[in-house]
Amino acid sequence: MTMSPHEVQAYVLTYLETLDCQIMERSPAHVTVKLSPEADKALTNRPYYWGFVERTGAPAETMSFTFVFDPDAHQQALEAAEAKTAQSAPPAGTNPGAEAPKDTILGRYFGIVPSLPQLGPGRILKEDVVYGSRRLQQIFNAAREGGEYVNLFEQAAKRQLRATAPAVYEPWLGVCFKVEFACDLKREELHFIGISLRTGEIVEKFGSKLNKRDLSPRLAENMHVQTAKVSLADAGAALEFHLTNRLLELDYSWAEKAKERLDLELAVVDTYYEAVLREDTPEVDVDTLSDSSREVNASGKDQAGPSTPIQPARSKPSRNQNVHLQPIEPTGVMIGSDVELAAESAVQAEPETDPEQDKARQAVMDREAMKLQYETRRTEMIWQYEPKVKVTAISSGMFHLR
């Protein structure tokens, strides 16, 4: 789905005019507008400024924009205007009535000082508003949030204002539903349905009924609003039930074709991954690994020599017992030989890695990763091709009609 520059311009102008923005200049390629306070709050992202205005009561100064809908055409128009101005302007130095540049202190030292760009509230910002631009998406979001719910009254004729008896309004609930028919293809429909809160009457093309009436958010004089007999919850449920019955009457041959395409895609995916997963994968022999580790540990103990017997602890000599102290002979040679034997046993105790077992472990990991990829691919195919119908209420409102 896309929008031409003319459609974008029509949409933006409708939004600006609805919010009472002041149009200063307009052409087929652009529009220069001074925003209203409501539009400025929605588009300029200045919460601190508007908070200051609301707290202090200072007069608000809104921003001005030049929205360009066709950049190429707008640039050509600017170049043509500049060329026309240059041709009509007299040559430099031939106009006796031209004002001489003002003598300033900076001008005496640096020559004629060029004028600085205009800043502050009086400046006009320029932006390209084309389909897909960030500004247009912001206008879409602002229009969706501002028009999500409305409360409008039909304006009475002038003779009704002078009538002795007030006219009566009938309350209606109108909901615009968006219906999406989605598979690997997608189609959208809008259904604007209204229901009377007095009689329960349902009108399918409710928008065509509203287009013929003058609606305003203000209640007209000499008008009376009737009390609703149907609650909003019951009215909404009745509209959903009515739309569901209408959708059940549609032709869903497209869904059957989508299921056939889904089965075909799943068959292709299953055939490919089954052939990959059917390949022989070496398995890791856990018993062999445990036996080899036991042999390594046993060989390490044998090479380390017999274990030293644990000597019983000697009792502490009493005071009457004679204690004979004998000099201790140096045992440096024995300690060195023990350290060497312990180091050799530690080195030999490390298990040796088997390349075949490592290869088997890697093959098992690859097989598990392939299974996960297979399941993910099937989930993606189902999400893309499975037919589904989605209904969303995008806007609603209360309409008081005569």
Image: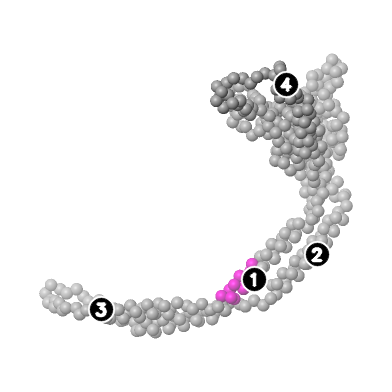
Callout 3 secondary element: helix
Give yes or no for contact between labels 4 and 1 (Cβ–Cβ under 8 Å): no
Residue 373 sits above or below residue 113 on the image: below
Mark 4 or mark 1: which comes first in sequence?
4
Mark 4 or mark 2: which comes first in sequence?
4
Residue drawn at (37%, 77%) of the image = 343
Q: Residues within 10 Å of mark 3 (few under 14, many from 20)?
A: few
Magenta span covers which residues? 358-369
Give yes or no for contact between labels 3 and 2 (Cβ–Cβ under 8 Å): no
Give yes or no for contact between labels 3 and 1 (Cβ–Cβ under 8 Å): no
Mark 4 vs mark 1: give the one in front: 4
Q: What predominant SS class does the magenta segment belong to?
A: helix
Residue drawn at (71%, 27%) of the image = 34
Q: Quadrant of residue 137?
A: top right
Residue 252 sits above or below residue 34 on the image: below
Q: How far is disc 3 from disc 2 in space, using C-alphas? A: 82 Å
Is 47 magenta? The answer is: no
Per the image, the residue denoted by label 4 is: 94
Residue 255 sits above or below residue 119 on the image: below
Residue 225 in view in this figure: yes
Which amino acid is tagged 1? Answer: Arg
Mark 3 or mark 4: which comes first in sequence?
4
Callout 4 secondary element: loop
Per the image, the residue denoted by label 3 is: 332
Which amino acid is tagged 4? Answer: Thr
Mark 3 vs mark 1: give the one in front: 3
Query: Which sits in the foreground, 2 or 78?
Result: 78
- Disc number for residue 367: 1
Query: Which sits in the foreground, 244 or 332?
Result: 332
